[in-house]
Amino acid sequence: MPITLAVITSTFPEEERGKATGVWTGVAGGGGILGMFLSAALVDVVGWRHLFILPVALAVVALVMTVRSVPNPASTRTTPSTSSAHSPPPSPSSASSSSSRKAPSTAGAPPPP
C-alpha cells in the first residue's frame, strides 16, 4: 500500500492531495470490510469456486476507474525545445576530457600471453 500513497503524492497537486488521500483511505478501509461480507455471501449463494472470478472483475473495474480519474503526469511536463536537437558538435576540449576516462577493469580476465 505505500506505493499507492507515493503515486498519490507525486500525481496530485498539493491542493487536491488531501482529498485524494482521504478517498484512498476510505476505499482501502471500506474495501477490506466489504470484501469479507461479500465473499461470505458469494460462498453461501454460488459456491467457493466463484471467488476466483471476483478479483478479476474488481481489477478490471479498478483499472477503468484509474484511467478515467487519475491525471497523467507525463502530459503536464514540458517537453525539451526542438532547438537542442540541432546543437553544434562538441568542442575539442570536451573530446579530450572524455579520453581521460579510466579504461574498463580487467579484473577476472586471464593474463595476456
Image: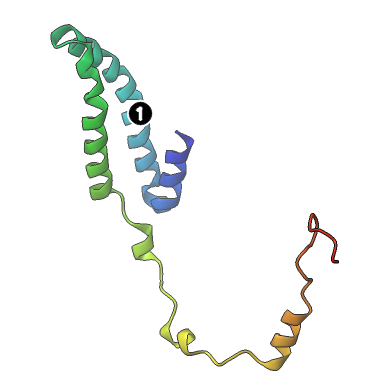
Q: Is residue 63 above or below residue 30?
A: below
Quadrant where the N terminus is found in the figure: top left
Q: Residue at 23% x, 37% y: name it.
A: 60
Does residue 106 appear to the left or right of 82 in the view shown?
right
- Residue 58, image x, y percentages: 24, 31
Q: Residue at 84% x, 66% y: name it.
A: 112
Figure quadrant of residue 46: top left
Figure quadrant of residue 26: top left
Does residue 61 appear to the left or right of 14 in the view shown?
left
At label 1, the amino acid type is Ala
Q: Residue at 55% x, 93% y: name it.
A: 88
Figure quadrant of residue 20: top left
Q: Residues within 10 Å of mark 1 (few under 14, many from 20)?
A: few
Q: Residue at 39% x, 42% y: name it.
A: 18
- Residue 105, image x, y percentages: 78, 63
Local SS, label 1: helix
Quadrant where the C terminus is found in the figure: bottom right
**Residue at mark 1:** 28
Q: Is residue 4 above or below residue 54?
A: below
Q: Residue furthest left?
A: 45
Does residue 7 appear to the left or right of 112 in the view shown?
left
Foreground residue, 82 or 97?
Answer: 97
Foreground residue, 8 or 17?
Answer: 8
Q: In this view, does 39 lie above or below 95?
A: above
